Structures are given as C-alpha cells and as structure tokens.
Amino acid sequence: MKTVVIGVIGADVHAVGNKIIDHVLTEYGFNVVNIGVLSSQEDFINAAIETNAKAILVSSLYGHGEMDCKYLRENCDEAGLGHVKLYVGGNIVVGKQDFKEVEQRFKKMGFDRVYPPGTNIEDAVKDLREDLGE
Amino acid sequence: MGIHLLVDFGSTYTKLTAVDLEKEDIIGTSKAMTTVKTNVLDGFNLALEKLKVSCPDMPEITGISACSSAAGGLKMAAIGLVEELTVEAAKRACLGAGALVNLVFSHHLSRKEVKQLKQADIDIILLAGGTDGGNKECIIHNAKKLRDADLGVPIIVAGNKDAADEIEEIFDASNQEYYIVDNVMPKLKMLNVKEAKEVIRQIFITKIIEAKGIKKAEEQTGEIIMPTPEAVLLAAELLAKGYEDEEGFNELMVIDVGGATTDVHTIGEGFPKRSEVILKGLQEPFAKRTVEGDLGMRYSANALLSLVSPYEFKQYYEYDETDIEQSALKRHENVEYLPDTDQERAFDNALARICCDYSMSRHVGHVEVVYTPLGNMYYQTGKDLTDIQYVIGTGGVLINNEDAKEILKEVNHKSNKKLELRPTDPVFLIDRKYILASMGLLGQKYPKLALKLMKKYLV
Ligand code: B12
C-alpha cells in the first residue's frame, strides 16, 4: 500500500476538502496520513520521513498558498525526500487568475502536479497511480 | 499483618520506611550510606539497625519492597528517526521507565555516534524509528551499525513493525541481546510507550541490578522491583488519580531537586485551555517525567552555573562578596557537603531556586505566536499546566529546608516567561518525611494505604 501525506498548509483552517480527500484516497487503497489543517512545511516533511510517504498532497484554500508553499521542494530535498512527489490543489492563489500561469509558477517552485479549484480527486488518483506506479 | 518495609537504595543513602499495616501508619524511617562498592547489604543492615533502635517495639517485618537508583541509576541511549517524533517518543519511554537518557541520536547513526555509544556508560539502548508501515530503512541501518559495534548492552527495538523480522535476523546472526516490542510511535504523533517501559523495567530487574552490584541486596529484600524515579512517578500517579473511594488530588506536579539532577513529574492531560490555541507535536504522556542532568545542587552545581550569567545569579542570591564559582565547585567536588552558615544556606537556596525555575521552563508546554496573513495564531507544544492544583517538592535540599515553599514558588508563571504554560496558583506541599518513592513501592501492593499516607504526610 502506497503512503501519501495530506494536509492543509499554513494558517488555513478550511477542513472540509481535507476530509473528503482523506476519504476518497483511502477508498482507492492509499494509506493516507492526514496531518490536518494548520500544518507547517516541517509537519509535512516530518510526517513523510517517518511514514515513508511517496507523495505529499498539499491543500491551500485561503489564498496564501504561494507564500506558504515557497521552498517546500527545497526543504524536502534537504530532508532526504527528493524522491517524494509534491502535489498542490485547492484555491492556491488569490482571486481568479489564469490557471496556466499559476500552474507554471508552482511547477517552477518544484511541484510535480498543480490542480485548479474544483478538481475531482479521482483525477489526482489517476496521476498518483501514474507517478508512483501501481 | 505486621510491618511492610520499603527500601530505596539511593545513590548516596539507603533509605528505609517502615509501615505498620495494622495501624495504617508510618512508624519509622532511617537511612545509612549506600555501600555498593563493598557490600550493598552493609548499608542496608546499618539502616535496619538504626530503625530498630528508634522503634524498639516494632512488630515483625512481614514484607519488603525495594527500588534502586544506586551506582548511577539506570542509564539509557535513545535512538529514533525524526527528532520531534520517534526520537522524542523513545526518550519519553526511557524517562517514563525511570531512566536517565544520557545519549540521544536521530536519523542514521554515524561512526562518530557509535563511538560515543561505546565510550559512554550505557545500560540499555532503545532503538526506534518509523511508524508501523513507514520508514524501515533507517532503523535497519542503525540495527546493523549497533550489531557491528558489539556494545555488549541489551537493545530494545521499538520501531516500525515492518522492520522487525529483518532486525531479528541481523541480531540473531551475532549474540546481541535484544527485545522486540511495540512501536513507540505506531502512527504519526501517537505515543505508545507501555510495552517498551515494561521491558526496560524487566531488564533492569534481571540484569542491571546485578551488573551494578546491587543484586546481593535481594538476599534480604526480595526482588528490587523498579528504578527509584519510576517509583516516584507511580506515587504521583496514584496520588493524582485516587483509589476506589479514597479520593486523589487530581492534576499535580512533583519536583525532585537532587544533587545531580532535577526531575519533574506531572500527572495530567495538559490540553490547551483556550479554543484559539492549536496543539502541535507528539502526543504527551498522561504521567510525564523529565530529567535535567545539568540542574542539581551538588554534582551538577557547576554545570548549573554555566547556564546563568553572574547577573542572573544575583537575582536569586542576596550576598555580594561570595566567589560564586568557588562555591559551586566546592559542591561539585564534595557531593556530601552540608551548608553551615547562613550565607552557604542562601547559596544552596539560590541553586535550588534556579533548579526549579529552569527545570520548569523545560518541562511545561510553550505557546508560540504565529503571525499569519490573517492575524496572530497560537500553537501549543507540550502540556498546558497553568491549572495544576498541587506542586509537591521532594529531594534532600527541599525537604529539610524551612524556605522550601518559597523556593518552590519559582515554578510559577513569570512575567518574563509569558509563553511558558507554568502553574499559576498551586498549593505547595513538601515531602518532609521523604516517602514518595516508598509510597510508589507500597502502592504496588497496598494502593489505598499508600494514598492515605501520602495525603497525611505531604504537608
Ligand atoms: C466554508 C468556507 C470557510 C469556512 C471554513 C470552515 C472550515 N473549518 O472548514 C470559514 C468561515 C472558517 C472560512 C474562513 C475563511 N475563508 Co473561506 N470559504 C469557505 C467556502 C465557502 C467553502 C469551502 C469548502 O469547504 N468547500 C468544500 C470543499 C469540499 O471543497 P474545497 O475545500 O475546495 O476542496 C476540494 C477541492 O478544492 C480539491 N482540493 C483541495 N485541496 C486539494 C489538493 C490537491 C492536491 C488536490 C488534487 C485537490 C484539492 O478537493 C477538495 C475536495 O473535493 C469557500 C468558497 C467555496 N465555495 O469554495 C470559501 C473560501 C475558500 N474562503 C475564502 C476566504 C478568503 C476565507 C477567509 C480568508 C475569509 C476572511 N477574510 O476571514 C477565511 C480564512 C480562514 C482561515 N484561517 O483559513 C476564499 C478564498 C479566496 C482565495 N483563495 O482567493 C473562498 C474561495 C471564498 C471566496 N470565493 O472568496 N471559509
């Protein structure tokens, strides 16, 4: 069973989506380690190390995602998690922005997959299977 | 019926407490120097003689229970993966079992660290790392390193269960003594130290006592059942929880200011008291013990001094003309030193106050203000002890000190340490008869009586 860490980054308290992601990924056979809302980069990283996670799925809903996610890739690499895939989704930037551009910005920050608002978790499941192998 | 005798083989003194089971009272206490270097029974017998002299009509001794912290106590090394997670969980298992944690390592053991393990005087190693189903590569690496080092010390493996079989093979291939127990952190942030603690105690009883030359005592006392600090922790837990219809004190703290260390025990959940505070970090044990090896009245007096500036020291000490370093060194070098002037007593009080203050900073939970785009938020790590009702002082300096309660006030909330979740307005009690460890022992067989006696004699 593949382990993934999920959580909501920064000072963000939007809890509903996080619960749904937990539920859906568990249904699809992932071992989900949910660190919940209000999680720091360090919380994601420590959880991934101890649980040997293959991917980290970051949620950000409240608009400050760009700031909160900065250097997450670098910090993971530093902690020996270079092999761990980084996904991000939710409402990751402030207001309505051109998603192509947003995606580019987050990819440049080292995220492997970037999802627009209202994404179906099933899409992410497909990507996870592709990225992590069955 | 008759007398149940409680024996504590301490690092300096062997202490006896005689409990009359019929009268339900402590009828006498005595102490003599611990004699591990020659024959540990010499000290015990001398203390027993003294006890018999002071209570000539003592009924027959019908039972004995003993604990020990002699010959340096129980020394352990804790090894885990991430510092805040499995390393911390491993440390808590050791401390909860009454050990001193002399070495702590995280991630992959290096040659240098293995060398430190070889040179240190360690009794047991606790090896953790990874949640169940999580990382196993690190703990396997460390198991191999430990096998190759051939330290001749028992290893308790309390990590990712998925690694257990492989670790068994690694250790079976050598004659490494090892025990595989439940993971100290089976799930992220979940603390599970019960089995690890039990096995630590088991090894202590069967092996360590012997290695330290205390086994001989068992000819007289029967099995020495636990390390002394564990007995204190059990006493505190009993006193907090109560037993049957005998009510306890609820959440409480015991602070034991010793010559080499200051131990703090708290019994209580310590959850956040305010809704806007978010709890962070590894789950806290209900009965929590921390030990500060650099805070002590004698052996550690000079280590303590290196923590405070001369200016700070003056905040605790009113005399001007003393050579502070010299006074600390004198205590470090002569651990049996007793102050004989007002000034020396004041110096001891200053040390004791620093022990209380600093150990509290490290024991209690902290809040951290996080400045977010949405304003301030508060994260709490550790226990919120602001509502603790009772703080009980024990240890040589405090129990014989008139100013004990004044000294204990140092544990209280301080305006310059606002982010520390210290007690605010507790009742202070002193273990004047020095019975806490004994009552932890007695509580194993006669919990209700032990509880009654603590309520009577902690004043
Ligand atoms: C309910 C809600 C709240 C509640 C949250 C209660 C709680 N504890 O959960 C409260 C009232 C507390 C709240 C507060 C705020 N909110 Co609000 N909130 C909402 C609201 C109405 C619904 C959120 C929700 O639960 N959706 C339902 C779940 C199922 O969907 P979801 O969270 O989007 O998650 C799904 C997908 O996004 C996706 N997904 C999420 N993460 C990831 C990650 C990956 C890798 C993938 C693949 C997919 C994925 O899958 C999830 C499940 O289907 C939204 C508007 C909206 N309709 O979305 C605003 C909204 C998110 N909030 C917003 C704002 C601005 C705030 C506040 C800053 C308001 C303020 N000024 O105080 C605060 C922030 C508080 C904080 N510290 O976080 C904005 C964010 C704007 C932006 N990003 O630019 C929104 C979009 C409203 C808006 N249109 O302006 N909010």
Image (cartoon, helix red, strand yellow):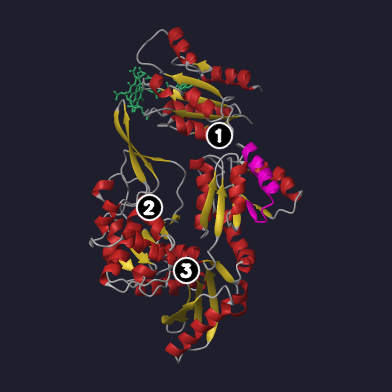
Mark nearest the camera among 1 and 3 is 1
* Amino acid type assigned to the residue bearing label 1 in the image: Ile
Q: Chain for mark 3?
A: B
Which residue bears the numbered disc 1? A49
**In front: label 1 or label 2:** 2
Q: Residues within 10 Å of mark 1 (few under 14, many from 20)?
A: many
Q: Which mark is residue B440?
A: 3
Label 2 sits on a secondary structure element that is loop
Amino acid bearing label 3: Gly
Q: Is mark 2 within 8 Å of ligand 1?
A: no
- Please say if the residues under marks 3 and 2 sit with CB atoms less than 8 Å apart: no
- Mark 3 to mark 2 CA distance (whole Å): 34 Å
Between B273 and B359, the one nearer to me in the picture: B359
Mark 2 — on which chain does it sit?
Answer: B
Residue A52 horizontal/vertical position (percent) = 59, 33
**Element type where label 1 sits in the image:** helix
* Image spot of residue B202 (x, y percent): 61, 62
Residue B446 coordinates in the image, percent (x, y): 49, 73
Pick out the residue farthest to the right.
Answer: B173
Callout 1: residue from which chain? Answer: A
- How many dots with numbers? 3
Q: Which residues are magenta?
A: B136-156
- The answer to whether residue B333 shows anywhere in this view is yes
Q: Quadrant of the C terminus of chain B?
A: bottom left
Residue linked to disc 2:
B306
